[in-house]
Amino acid sequence: MKRTQITQAAIATAIGITIGATATTSLDTSEPAPAVVEQAAQARVAGTIRWQSPTKWATVQDAGHAPEGIRDVQVLRDRIRVHYTFTASKVVSLQVTPDESFTAANVRCGVSVGLAYSDVFCYMPGKTTPVDPSLLTRKGGNIWVSGLFDL
């Protein structure tokens, strides 16, 4: 066999035809069918929480703010607990962000995320232990909460 015949035979074998057989080709120019990916039902937590009094933080609900997925807010000794309106099966993500007034005061916040609630911890400059949230009395100071969960 010549090199050309060997190459043709190899290609024919690779694509599953016999040399001398008639092959038919169909040119399908349509888009391939999209893969079906099942996605878990999901719920969001989103909103603004604000100091109301030494024993109370709450979501902001007014003409410009509408919380979603937050049932209530609880003040504990060293954290602010944000309860969801659901119990998740998995955390996708959740983050908290202090607004510009807390940021200007160098208050930083972090969150420990659970399936039914999250604990927001705030820290004063140079400190490594959380501050008592009842002391975070900056007028108009907010903490933004945003997250996504699988149900």
Image (cartoon, grey):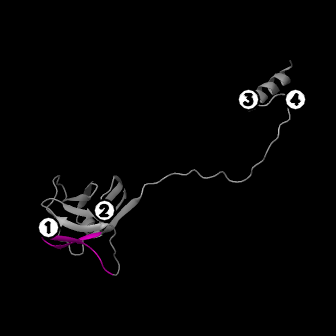
User: How busy is the neighbourhood of tag 1: few (under 14 within 10 Å), some, or many (20 plus)?
Assistant: some
Q: Hey, which quadrant is residue 53 in on the image?
A: bottom left
Q: Residue at x 55, y 52 (%)?
A: 36
**Residue on which the image places disc 3:** 14
Q: Earlier in the sequence, mark 3 or mark 4?
A: 3
Residue 142: image location, x then y, percent: 26, 70
For residue 86, the mark is 2
Q: CA distance from mark 3 to mark 1?
A: 74 Å
**Residue on which the image places disc 1:** 134
Answer with left or right where residue 37 lies relative to residue 109: right
Q: Earlier in the sequence, mark 3 or mark 1?
A: 3
User: How busy is the neighbourhood of tag 4: few (under 14 within 10 Å), some, or many (20 plus)?
Assistant: few
Q: CA distance from mark 3 to mark 4?
A: 15 Å
Q: Hey, which quadrant is residue 67 in on the image?
A: bottom left
Give the amino acid type for the residue marked by disc 3 in the picture: Ala
Residue 97: image location, x then y, percent: 30, 62
- Under tag 1, what secondary structure? helix
Residue 9 visible (yes or no)? yes
**Residue on which the image places disc 4:** 20
Q: Is residue 51 magenta?
A: yes
Q: Earlier in the sequence, mark 2 or mark 4?
A: 4
Q: CA distance from mark 3 to mark 2?
A: 55 Å
Q: Earlier in the sequence, mark 2 or mark 1?
A: 2
For residue 147, the mark is none
Total numbered labels placed on residues in the image: 4
